[in-house]
Amino acid sequence: MRPFFFVFLIFGSQFLLAQDTSLVAQKKILQLMGSRFELTAVATTKQEAWDAINAGIKEIERIELLISSWDENSQTSEINRKAGISSVPVDKELYDLIYRTKKVSQLTEGAFDISFASMDRIWKFDGSMKQMPDGEIIKKAKAKINWQDIILDSEKQTVFLKNKGMRIGFGAIGKGYAANRAKELMRNRKGVKGGVVNASGDLITWGVSNKEEGWVVSITNPKDKEVALGWLQINGLSVVTSGDYERFVEFAGKRYAHIIDPRTGYPTTGIKSVTLICPDAELADALATAVFVLGKEKGLALVNQLKQTDCLIVTDEDEILPSNNLQLNYF
């Protein structure tokens, strides 16, 4: 779960006043997918705004049922149960999502990998873990992580995890995908002119905002959540932050973030937060995790090669490292 406060919208003294005074804005905050979601719609009528928000909520709930690894009736759970045994026919939507995750794994050389889920029950970041897990246990679980062992059959539309004990999970991409889908449904509703879907820090905006310059997003300092590092001017973009402010452990004076490096089986070190900006919330979600894993040098090098993509890294030493083209405004 990403700390919700790392990225937040600046709305001024009122929550939202659209540029056109004939428009109205409505907002709903609720728990979905185990996280805090905030959905905002700007529309020509109050009812149209609420219709859009409710449509977005239903879509997120639908996606949760599709990708949840905790729901034993989901297709994702069926894939995990049949690991090393047989392939599983899945809906095209889930097949395509898994296909895209493999593309990101290839791009990031395995720094992003949905088969990291075999580590789910080893590392705990809720305060209950008092010592480093046994190295042998980590080694055995790590042996089950390999995105290349997620076998897809496009003709049969099936997914097969090659080895017994393998598991997939969408914790590092699911909320971004849900935000994308909710945005599309809300944007296409009658009378809707703009809005925001904020999935616990996985945020995407579109259309009319309360300011002439568009949506303004503040990036909060992970060292002090009451202080902003600066702000971004965005329109039709997604801003996603991965941070360890609330979820980390310390052993022998060393800080470990809650994000697991799928290449080693151990938590990442050296970075406090990564903010990723690009047009697609799903991709931003995955890349934010990948940059965290890759570290500051390789992470920045990757982002600087990608079009319409920027990031801001805050290291454990409180270095603030922007990508080459990031337009961050300072207060």
Image: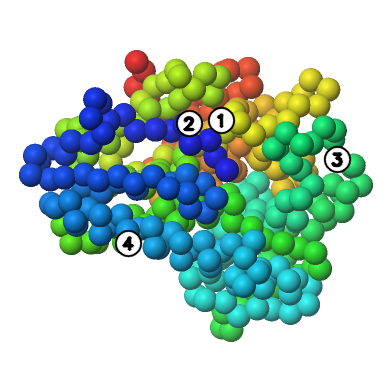
- Locate residue 10, reporting x and y percent: 31, 29
Q: Earlier in the sequence, mark 3 or mark 4?
A: 4
Q: Which residue is mark 4?
A: 55
Q: Earlier in the sequence, mark 4 or mark 2?
A: 2
Q: Which residue is mark 1?
A: 273
Q: What amino acid type should be assigned to the residue bearing mark 2?
A: Phe
| Residue that extends furthest to the bottom in the rendered view of this protein | 156
- Foreground tag (3 vs 1): 3
Instruction: Please identify the quadrant where the N terminus is shown.
Output: top right
Q: Please tell me which residue lies in front, 263 or 82.
A: 82
Q: Secondary structure at mark 3?
A: loop
- Foreground tag (2 vs 1): 2
Give me the C-alpha separation between circle 3 and circle 4.
43 Å
Give me the C-alpha separation between circle 4 and circle 2.
26 Å
Checking the image for residue 133, the label placed there is 3
Instruction: Please identify the quadrant where the C terminus is shown.
Output: top left
- Foreground tag (4 vs 2): 4
